[in-house]
Image: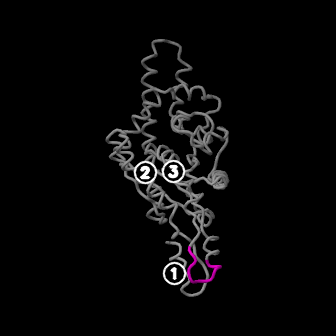
Amino acid sequence: MRISLTTCKQTLPLLQFPANAIAQLLHRRKDKVVVVMGATGAGKSRLSVDLATRFPAEVINSDKMQVYKGLDIATNKITDEERCGVPHHLLGVVDPESDFSAANFRSMASSAVESILHREQLPIIVGGSNSFIEALVDSDFRSRYDCCFLWVDVSMATLHSFVSDRVDRMVERGMVSEVRDFYNPEDADYSRGIRRAIGVPELDYFFRMESSSSSSDDEETRARILAEAVDRIKMNTSKLACRQLEKILRLRNVKGWELHRLDATDVFRKRGGEAAWENIVAGRSAAIVSRFLCDRRRVAYGGGAPGMEASLMAAASY
């Protein structure tokens, strides 16, 4: 059932305290933002769309490679079909030659959030670039918005196997040809722009060898070098997943972020059964978000006479 955000902003009952206290409560209530986190391949994009089809919501991408135009397969951008009509922001919009920093993301994401809220929709920020999310949240963002953090977690052993299979599927979909079309031997700076994306530098040697070879006798050599490049893509993607998990654990354990952990390991072991995903991830997430949207206890109170805060809390929990 779709839940309108406006239904969670009902008028509070008039209790026995000054009328301006209710006005203060309403004024201090923050707009809501949902943040979906997790390692690469864990199902973040899928969950964000699932939520956006249950709530009136729009998605903001926070993956630092997916913000760039191009290389849709290599950067594993969610397809038009997979978006299910849900509006997505900061996805494939940045010049691939430019550098897109955490400060750039903070500015563009903040504007997107304001625009989405203006349309009375729920902003859902999703992506694996936790440094971008941290830079956004650690600004004045938390003072302006109430955040609900959903963490889709999968055991590393299970995720590594899935990532390996996913890279094979990306190759089958045409990733090598896609990167080849983008490849420029005269400008192979893999430290900036979209060229930092996993899958681009790993294929450099294969393309150089391919362009300098003319004999059909080298087919076996080319196949071997390509296979080695694909193996490096798998290895580097797995390393990325480990780094992402380490950052999430730091945000939870060191910085004290309250993360709702959703263990999707069994879903992946069952190879993506729809019932398992619904029961373990999507359904639980929807329940968490529903409570979050209607929870008036997450209000920043300030000032007032002694005992006023307790009265306000009672009103907020009505």
Residue found 48% across the figure and 46% down from its top: 50
On the image, which quarter does residue 227 sit in? top left
Between the C-alphas of marks 2 and 3, the distance is 22 Å
What residue is pinned by disc 2? 152
Q: Position of residue 45 (x, y in %)?
A: 50, 44
| Among numbered discs 1 and 3, the one appearing first in the sequence | 3
Disc 1, SS? helix
Disc 2, SS? strand
Query: Residue type at mark 1?
Result: Ala
Q: Position of residue 140 (x, y in %)?
A: 63, 64
- Considering depth in this image, is 262 or 214 the residue closer to the camera? 262
Extreme residue in the top direction: 216
Query: Residue type at mark 3?
Result: Arg
Mark in front: 2 vs 3: 3
Residue 115 got which mark?
Answer: none
In the image, which residues are magenta?
Answer: 13-21
What residue is pinned by disc 3? 2
Residue found 51% across the figure and 59% down from its top: 148
Examine the residues drawn in magenta and state their main secondary structure: loop
Label 2 environment density (alpha carbons within 10 Å; few <14, some 14–19, many ≥20): many
| Among numbered discs 2 and 3, the one appearing first in the sequence | 3
Residue 310 got which mark?
Answer: 1
The answer to if 139 sits in the magenta stretch is no
Between the C-alphas of marks 2 and 1, the distance is 35 Å
Q: Position of residue 8 (x, y in %)?
A: 55, 62
Q: Is residue 193 left or right of residue 50?
A: right
Query: Residue type at mark 2?
Result: Val
Q: Is residue 22 left or right of residue 175?
A: right
Q: Are marks 1 and 3 in contact (CB under 8 Å)?
A: no
